[in-house]
Image (cartoon, coloured by chain):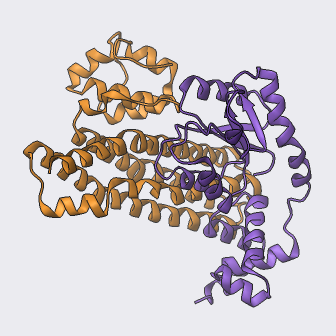
Amino acid sequence: MGQFRNVVVIEKNYLIQAGLEAIISELPGMVFQKACMGSEKNLAHLLIKQNPDVVIVNPFSLDQPVAVFLNTLNEHISPLIFGLMDKSAPENMKSPFANLLFFSDNKLEIQKKIRNVCEPVSDEQDKKQVLSKREATILKEVVLGLTNQEIADKLFLSVHTVTTHRKNINKKLGIKTVSGLTVYALMNQLVSMDEMENKG
Amino acid sequence: MLIDQKMKMADVVLHDPTLVPVINRFGIHLGFGDQTIEEICKTHGLHVQFFVITLNAFHDKLYFPTEQLQSFKASLLIDYLQKAHRYFLEDKTPEIADLIERTLREDDVNKTTYGLIKKFFNEYREEFAKHIEREDQIIFPYVLKLEKALEAGTAEEQLLHKIQTHPIVEYEAEHEDVEAKIFDLKNIIIRYLPTPNNDALWYQILREIFTLEKELAEHARIEDLILIPKVEAMEKAIKGGN
């Protein structure tokens, strides 16, 4: 996705949702993707599919324990997570979060907090948008229809490593689906039409 | 801005012209003079609240309808959603396919590369059509049955069983893959596709894809914000009533 960062806000209070949208929209490269109430069924899975870069969550809006919610998220995606609450919230509500936004923060404080956490990463990531040799090899196998397990066996890697490579490929190319990756691979001759037709 | 029934239709469209296809789907066409939304609904025999909720859901992505969901029949909503489906299948996607076809006929384009885009888009269309067919043939009839059962005050065993085993929430996550493909198509076109000499045609394809994506997201929002909560309430009422 390059420099742009998608932000999801989970907060049942509409005024706060809308306020955060306004503040986030003023930051360069930050895109307000979605506001959730916190009571949605399958909220964690909804977010996993959306795969936002930043999640701002008010733990009091969730209708499930915050630890359960964060664990489910972190198993699948790795967004930057901000807790959103009153400054006087109890310590056990604050401790699950590495970053906190408070209702009493002014606009500049909120923007500064978000930028501080979000910016250093983007520079480094943008420099290497080209696929590494390993990634190109894995892309080819994906396009030819192999599962992560099969790729791991073939290249003597762990499934976990293959998954990480695949995530990086998706990020670098900005393409998520296998058919999209196929178009890219064919356009760039990473795989030939003949190979595609013989994949069985 | 929240749209309400006392507003003039013309003012609303001047404020947000992307509502035009939505309004058309209700059988309303431009040229409404000075009429308010309420008056137009009356002449067209439309349910005012349903119309206003739908406009708002399209207009504002933070909009969240609350209490009025029970004020109109589910069949009204289904009728609207089916019209939207036909719009996507019969107008929108063929339009884009046609544009891609026209690009392929240009002399200077790389036939292999654009052939891949064409193939990709056709796959997308098939998948999208399947997704829509599933809604049309499984989900919508289910919703209509729920409404009938509620009106009759009694539900068949089969329907009760289905409420238990396949409640509407299970369908919620279905849109995602179709959306991911459109996202990829945009990226491929913008990042990797060599531009043909005919810039205007190329730009038109891109613009149409963005419009399609936006309209689909809005459509999904109608289903998530209006259809699903409404059906959930119906499921609950039937379960409670038996």
Q: The chain coloured orange carries which letter?
A: B
Q: With B206 as the anchor, is B233 left or right in this view?
A: left
Decide: is A58 above or below B12.
Answer: below
- Residue A11 falls in image quadrant: top right
Foreground pick, A171 / A130: A171
| Observer able to see residue A153 | yes
Pick whichever, A147 or A187, lies toward us.
A147
Give how far across and how far down residue A114 sits, in percent.
79, 35
Q: Where residue B146 appears, x then y in whole percent?
A: 20, 50
Q: Position of residue B71 (x, y in %)?
A: 24, 29
Instruction: Name the residue at the top extreme.
Output: B34
Res. B103 in view? no
In purple, which chain? A
Q: Is residue B232 above or below residue B176?
A: above
Residue found 78% across the figure and 70% down from its top = A165
Q: Residue at left 75%, top 76%?
A: A162
Q: Is residue A119 above or below residue B99?
A: above
